[in-house]
Image (cartoon, grey):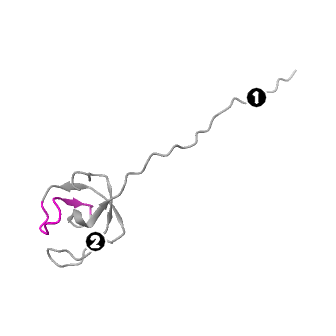
């Protein structure tokens, strides 16, 4: 996943289990979306991922806690067409 995720991408937290290194609760919320600040190519001590993701909360988190959300597709907005106003001629 580290090659697919980059800074600015949106990720969904799918695992808010306690920190697997310290056992302390994590400040992440399952089901919440976070914006990626940085991706660090570093093998996580848990052995489940090859990168850590910085989402701006605490330090970096194992990428196995997140799923990449699809980028929003561009939507065509209706454009207003301005028609020339008709002027009445006064004689």
In magenta, the rendered stretch is: 43-56
Task: Work out which quarter of the rendered image holds the C terminus and state it.
Answer: top right
Which residue is tagged 2?
A: 15
Distance from label 1 to label 2 (Cα)?
63 Å
Quarter of the rendering containing residue 66 = bottom left
* Residue 74, x across and y down, in percent: 45, 45
Task: Work out which quarter of the rendered image holds the N terminus and state it.
Answer: bottom left
* Residue 35, x across and y down, in percent: 32, 58
Q: Are marks 1 and 2 in contact (CB under 8 Å)?
A: no
- Chain-order first, disc 1 or disc 2: 2
Left or right: 56 in relation to 83 = left
* Residue 8, x across and y down, in percent: 31, 52
Which residue is tagged 1?
A: 86
Q: Secondary structure at mark 2?
A: loop
Q: Is residue 48 magenta?
A: yes
Q: Residue at x 58, y 39 (%)?
A: 79
* Residue 73, x across and y down, in percent: 43, 48
Given residues 33 and 49, the one toward you in this image is 49
- Please name which of the two marks, 1 or 2, marks the residue nearer to the observer: 2
Q: Residue at x 26, y 52 (%)?
A: 4
Residue 27 is tagged as: none
- Residue extending farthest to the top is 91
**Mainly helix, strand or loop, the magenta region?**
loop
Left or right: 9 in relation to 41 = right
Given residues 63 and 85, the one toward you in this image is 63
Total numbered labels: 2
Q: Residue at x 37, y 54 (%)?
A: 70
- Residue extending farthest to the right is 91
């Amino acid at each position: 996943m580290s090659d697919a995720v980059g800074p600015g991408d949106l990720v969904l937290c799918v695992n808010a289990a306690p920190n697997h290194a310290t056992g302390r609760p994590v400040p992440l919320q399952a089901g919440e979306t976070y914006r990626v600040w940085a991706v660090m190519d570093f093998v996580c001590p848990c052995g489940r991922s090859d990168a850590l993701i910085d989402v701006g909360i605490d330090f970096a988190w194992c990428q196995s806690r997140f799923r990449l959300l699809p980028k929003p597709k561009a939507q065509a907005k209706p454009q207003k067409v301005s028609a020339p106003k008709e002027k009445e001629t006064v004689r």
